[in-house]
Image (cartoon, helix red, strand yellow):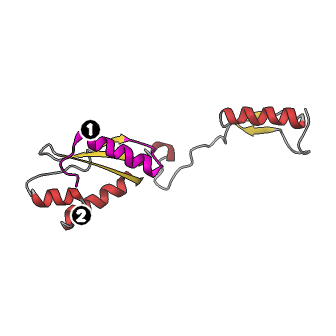
């Protein structure tokens, strides 16, 4: 086995099929045999709370989402940011009764209605491309005809 340097063990991190391509190129181009290695023994560092990072559910971003009022009317929206940030903006608009959110307009026009922002349906996930996300939002709006949307 050809060594890269005197202290090298010729192992590379395993990252799926890419690792196999790299190994094949190193063997063909430089006659270097490599092996794969896994990550460190302690893979999940602890946060200050004592919970591992892996135990926390990642907040979805790049989503199209669906909100329902207790009256049965619905709203479909999209955001590139983590959904929790957009929902907090809706909640702030409802609290302030401003017109920055169609949901705030609905609750202002119908004060007896209640919208549960903790019961959101995610219709599309992992849509980082703006035009695709907007197109998916438009398709869901056409399909469900949400009354709350402007």
Provide residue 55's location: percent of width, then percent of height. 46, 43
| Region rendered in magenta | 124-150
User: Is residue 142 highlighted in magenta?
Assistant: yes
Q: CA distance from mark 2 to mark 1?
A: 26 Å
Task: Identify the residue at horizontal 43%, vertical 46% (top origin).
Answer: 132
In this view, the residue in front, 88 or 143, is 143
Provide residue 3's location: percent of width, then percent of height. 90, 39
From the viewer's perspective, is residue 101 above or below residue 45? below
Report the residue marked by disc 1.
Answer: 143
Task: Identify the residue at horizontal 90%, vertical 34% (top origin).
Answer: 31
In this view, the residue in front, 106 or 132, is 132
Q: Are marks 2 and 1 in contact (CB under 8 Å)?
A: no
User: Is residue 24 highlighted in magenta?
Assistant: no
From the viewer's perspective, is residue 97 above or below residue 52? below
Q: Few, some or many C-alpha atoms within 10 Å of disc 1 (few <14, some 14-19, many ≥20)?
A: few
Tag 1 or tag 2, which sits nearer the N-term?
A: 2
Q: Few, some or many C-alpha atoms within 10 Å of disc 2 (few <14, some 14-19, many ≥20)?
A: some
Q: Secondary structure at mark 2?
A: helix
Label for residue 93? 2
């Amino acid at each position: 086995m050809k060594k890269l340097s005197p202290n090298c063990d010729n192992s590379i991190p395993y990252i799926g099929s890419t690792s196999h391509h790299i190994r094949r190129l190193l063997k063909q181009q430089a006659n270097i045999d490599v092996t794969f290695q896994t990550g460190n023994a302690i893979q999940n560092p602890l946060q200050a709370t004592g919970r591992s990072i892996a135990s926390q559910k990642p907040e979805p971003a790049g989503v199209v989402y669906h909100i329902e009022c207790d009256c049965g009317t619905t709203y479909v929206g999209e955001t590139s940011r983590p959904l929790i940030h957009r929902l907090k903006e809706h909640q702030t608009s409802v609290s302030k009764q401003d017109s920055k959110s169609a949901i705030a307009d609905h609750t202002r026009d119908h004060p007896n209605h209640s919208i549960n922002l903790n019961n959101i349906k995610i219709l599309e996930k992992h849509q980082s491309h703006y035009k695709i996300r907007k197109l998916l939002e438009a398709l869901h709006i056409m399909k469900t005809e949400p009354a709350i949307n402007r």
